[in-house]
Amino acid sequence: MAAARHFFAGRGVLEVDVPALSRFAVSDPNIDSLEISAAIAGPSTLYLSTSPEYAMKRLLAAGYPDIYAIARVFRDGELGRQHEPEFTLIEWYRRDFGLVEMAAETCEFVAAILERPALANNPVQLRYREAFQAAAGIDPLAASAAELATLADADESLVESLGDDRDAWLDLLMSTRIAAGFPDDRLTVVTHYPASQAALARLDANDRTVALRFEVFLGAMELANGYVELCDADEQRQRFETELHLRRAAGRQAAPIDEPLLAALEHGLPDVAGVAVGFERLHMLYESTGSIADVITFSFGTQR
């Protein structure tokens, strides 16, 4: 972590500490929080943090400068060669940065941590739509779920599982087909994800079918996910409510909306861009291993 702290110190970014326990959880349909039962102020359900994002935005709204956090986070249902239920996110926020500036700094950070400075130079730059059109000959913003399923060569059980969820099919294709073609010796920056995958990102003012969101890959491995952050409290509430409706319809966990975050947005979040980088994935690349268990002292799958 010393290299990460050195990187941010050189840029005047302040380290902050945020809680791992909350009364609220994310509503993102792709992420499940770990719940705990507690007797604090009476029996209640609390949630382990899946990201330091909400707390960090509250600090930014309260007047903090550019900030970063090195946070232990927890996600249910994530265990595999590249996933652990407990892992480390390095997340930071920069005032007055746009998509281009934030993606460029993320590439610089990855290059610094991996001790491969050349990686910061001339990364492959692709819009999400261009990436799909080049690798699969399909427009991801217009294709139907059935067309995406055909492209994925999905069997009957997968079709039944994903159904008509276009974003689920797009995520599957990105991980199994699109990113598989990214170069192993250069970073790839994919920008302008579909608006349906905006999460907490602002939509592009010039094309509201896409969001000001980017991801950084080295080869097929996703390393970072970043946004130009949404500042509109009303729009964010609407997104939360839509996501919770989807979760309830699927019979999944639906935690209370994080009202303190919405209050902070209402108070006024400055124009910021933010990004989260999975530390263990960087460590995997540094050690040239394909298994996250090789870089975690107590891997959940083998040691606990």
Image: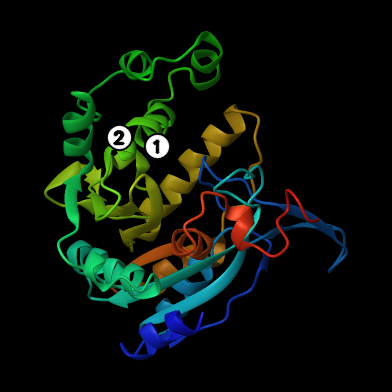
Going by the image, does 130 lie left or right of 1? left
Query: Quick one: SS at disc 1?
Result: helix
Query: Quick one: SS at disc 2?
Result: helix
* Residue 37 place in picture, x, y as percent: 83, 56
- Residue nearest the viewer, comparing 152 with 17: 152
Few, some or many C-alpha atoms within 10 Å of disc 2 (few <14, some 14-19, many ≥20)?
A: many
Question: Dot 1 corresponds to which residue?
Answer: 175
Colour mapping: rainbow
State the separation of the CA atoms marked 2 and 1.
6 Å
The reply to whether residue 122 is visible in this rendering is yes
At horizontal 27% and vertical 54% (from top left) the residue drawn is: 185
Question: Dot 2 corresponds to which residue?
Answer: 178
Q: Quadrant of residue 109?
A: bottom left
Circles 2 and 1 in contact, beta carbons < 8 Å: yes
Q: How many marks?
A: 2
- Residue nearest the viewer, comparing 256 with 124: 124
Q: Amino acid under label 2?
A: Ile
Q: Amino acid under label 1?
A: Ser
- Outermost residue, front direction? 288
* Residue 254 place in picture, x, y as percent: 63, 43
* Residue 192 place in picture, x, y as percent: 23, 47
* Residue 304 place in picture, x, y as percent: 81, 56
Few, some or many C-alpha atoms within 10 Å of disc 1 (few <14, some 14-19, many ≥20)?
A: few
The reply to whether residue 64 is visible in this rendering is no
- Outermost residue, top direction? 156
Asked if residue 289 is positioned above or below residue 176 in the image, the reply reads below
